[in-house]
Image: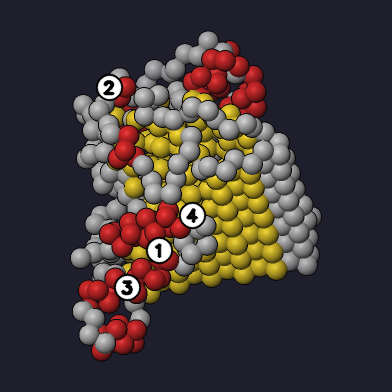
Amino acid sequence: MNQPAPLVAALADAPLPASGIAWLDAMRRENRELFAQTGLPGARVEAWKYTALRALSQRGFADGDAAAPAHALDAAALALPGVEGATLVFVNGVFRADLSTRDALPAGLTLQPLSQALHDDAEPLRFVLSRRHAGADEAFTQVNAAQARDGVVLRVAAGARIDAPVRMVFVGAPADGDRAWHLRNVIELGEGAELTLVEQHLATGEQRHLATVVGDIELRDGARLHHTVLQHAAEGASLIRRTALRLHARAHATLHLAELGGALVRHDLRAELVGDGAQLDTRGVFMPHGRQHIDTQLAIRHQALNTTSSSIWRGVASDRARGVFRGAIVVAPGADGSDANLGNKNLLLSPGAEIDTKPELEIYADEVKAAHGATVGQLDERSLFYLRSRGIPLAEARALLTAAFCRAVLDELPNEALREHLSSLLIDQLPA
């Protein structure tokens, strides 16, 4: 009989968190059983076709990090320009109250660790946390559902407008050996509510940990969310995320995402436009270098009348890095009048770099506007020649053109200080 790979064995055998909540403990057991049956997805699973897990599967990870509450960190090092507001910080999957800021929360905002929310009143979380995740492509979601001990619970009351950005900060710190941790986020905006949310994934030193982060975001009628995500994990880290958005009538979500760090990074971003007039805008950039592998899976489903989605993504790969982008749009039956646009442009800065892009479009409704496209190429030689003819050195000319190429996804970010900070990080990511 074949023995399971070390990673599968480690994740399947890790002790389950005991909550004392019957439905939650039963859900954890069921999802772990599903993972033990299916294991990790292979190349035959279409959603994982371009992201091989062979090397990761041969590694073992200790469950959690008992020393995480004592890791010395400077709160100032976690700051972001132009972002001041309530903050929850997690280090190696453990909530750190000493690094977080929740004093004098504005009216209408509830912000707490998942562990606290489950202790105070678990019943409001029952619907979202008691799901059974079946399917060959759901392995890491199953692990997360079984093992996540903490995360973020964020709610904005109906009609409330939260002016200062709220931050979720997930830090990977050096520890004794390779560790695995799992975080679960639940976010809900009530009718007519408005929120600016900033999500950070970062590192304070070299480590090779494995983290899974699963989030559910619900926008009720007329709610507005401005969500910025900065992923800058350690060079050796593995980070697997899944974010699911549901937009009800006239809700509007705007996402800006920058994927910069990690050795193996994957983000499944799934959006359902379930209410008439819902609107989704995504702007993203991924920039793998060295031997990095960054995989973005974007799936948007229009399910109601007159819904709109607009997605602009840029990819830049250098050295021997690999980027993957899949953009899938489905206009379901009954979603008449939908308007969907998706574009993905990519640059290869070295002969050994690779980007695989796969746009998909399915339409089952009438009077629909839809367009999608993808390109992979190199910097324009005529533009390079023009800059060099003006006395600009080759390396600087390449950096200028690449930065301009990426800036297209940041131009609409309203926070100027944050926009300039992200731009500088993109430039720093470019090869010398």
First-in-chain label (1 vs 2): 2
Crowdedness near tag 2: few (<14), some (14–19) or many (≥20) residues, C-alpha within 10 Å = few
Residue identifier under label 2: 70
Q: Nearer the viewer, residue 362 or 37?
A: 362
- The disc label shown at residue 400, or none: 3
Q: Is residue 194 left or right of residue 232?
A: right
First-in-chain label (4 vs 1): 1
Residue identifier under label 4: 415
Alpha carbon of mark 3 to alpha carbon of mark 2: how far? 42 Å
Report x, y in % for residue 32.
47, 25
First-in-chain label (3 vs 2): 2
Name which quarter of the figure residue 191 lies in. Answer: top right
Alpha carbon of mark 1 to alpha carbon of mark 3: how far? 16 Å
Mark 4 or 2: in front is: 4
First-in-chain label (4 vs 2): 2
Residue at image x 40%, y 24%? 97
Amino acid type at mark 4: Asn
Residue identifier under label 1: 315
Q: Is residue 381 left or right of residue 122?
A: left
Alpha carbon of mark 4 to alpha carbon of mark 2: how far? 34 Å
Report x, y in % for residue 173.
27, 34
